[in-house]
Image (tube, rainbow, N blue to C red):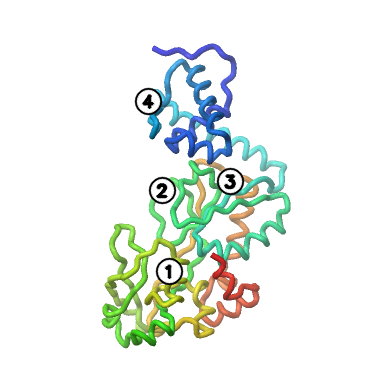
Amino acid sequence: MTQMKDSGFMDLNNLRIFERVASLKSFSAAARSLGLPKSSVSRSVARLEDELGTRLLQRSTRKVALTEAGLVFSQRCKEILAQVDVTVDHVSSLGSAPRGLLKLSAGIGFGVNVLSVLVPRFMAMYPRVDVSIELTSKNLDLIAEGIDIAIRMGPMPDSALMTTRLASVKRYMCASPQYLASRGSPATLEELAEHDTVEMLGMDGKPRTWNLTDARGGSLDVSVRPRLFVNDPLTIYRLVLNGAGIGCLTAYLCVADIESGRLVQLFPELAIPDVDVNIVFPSSKALSPSARAFVDYMKESSVPGTWWVNDSREGLVQRQSTAGVSADVKKRT
């Protein structure tokens, strides 16, 4: 039986570093995540193993694996560190204004077109808050990556995350005038099968079905066979704009192009289901004052009538103009 060496107080920094290595299964990834040299991470874990008198990790040239003791200790570390963070956040919130670094994650399109407008206003309201934004088409592990808040679109699976729905945004089926000039405009939904479409794969890895609703509320399901699959909505928008085919685009990406004639809306008499926009954060960690302030700010910025939460095409264009968002904003990526 191993026995912990009598070394006084255990350093919480060593616990945090070990927990990150255990979560990411990599010394290099943990070092990048923590902003530390890999050698420092290695020494920290070695010190912890020395204090505990047991090996926590099995190291090889290609991967890191937890020992049985490491697996148990990793789980307890998460619980201990979560309680420490909750306590620190609670005490800090008692008498402090929002400050420090706030780490956000969002999809690329939402970041370029919405957060690029909203975050500067938030920072002006809270001058002691610094913001780091990770734009990605993947759903990051918020705890492992140290993310405070993420913006995610679409249905939310059950998870250990706290979820607040911010708003819903409309989508429109579009194609470029150049594409329609070369391939013709589909007159019926059945004719979509003869056209190139651009889409994301569904959660099951299969092509998505386009669900449409007519003026009487009737549901119409269209099975398309996309010629081009992409895992990012902003890239789908750019591909459709450049003539790759027909796609279903989020309103704040495409409305200005529809109004200017750079895109053509197809089947305007049919509605595509709105997409929910959610703000999520780890349930195991209390929100810091800066994170709480951002959640409240996003709620206030997401009520019907604000520029990106559209209830009509014309209304969105007008609100985009008022917010100072030009069609060129989304062309920066």
User: Badge 2 local density, few (<14 within 10 Å), some, or many (20+)?
Assistant: few
Image x and y of residue 134, in percent: 54, 53
**Mark number, residue 287:** 3
Count up the numbered dots: 4
User: Badge 4 local density, few (<14 within 10 Å), some, or many (20+)?
Assistant: some
Q: Earlier in the sequence, mark 1 or mark 3?
A: 1
Q: Is residue 264 left or right of residue 43?
A: left
Q: Nearer the viewer, mark 1 or mark 3?
A: 1
Secondary structure under badge 4? loop
Callout 4 touching callout 1 (CB < 8 Å)? no
**Location of residue 13 with respect to 138 vertically, above or below:** above
Which residue is the site of mark 1?
A: 236
**Mark number, residue 159:** 2
Q: Earlier in the sequence, mark 3 or mark 4?
A: 4
The answer for how far apart the CA atoms under marks 1 and 3 are is 34 Å
User: Badge 3 local density, few (<14 within 10 Å), some, or many (20+)?
Assistant: many
Q: Earlier in the sequence, mark 4 or mark 1?
A: 4
Q: Nearer the viewer, mark 3 or mark 4?
A: 4
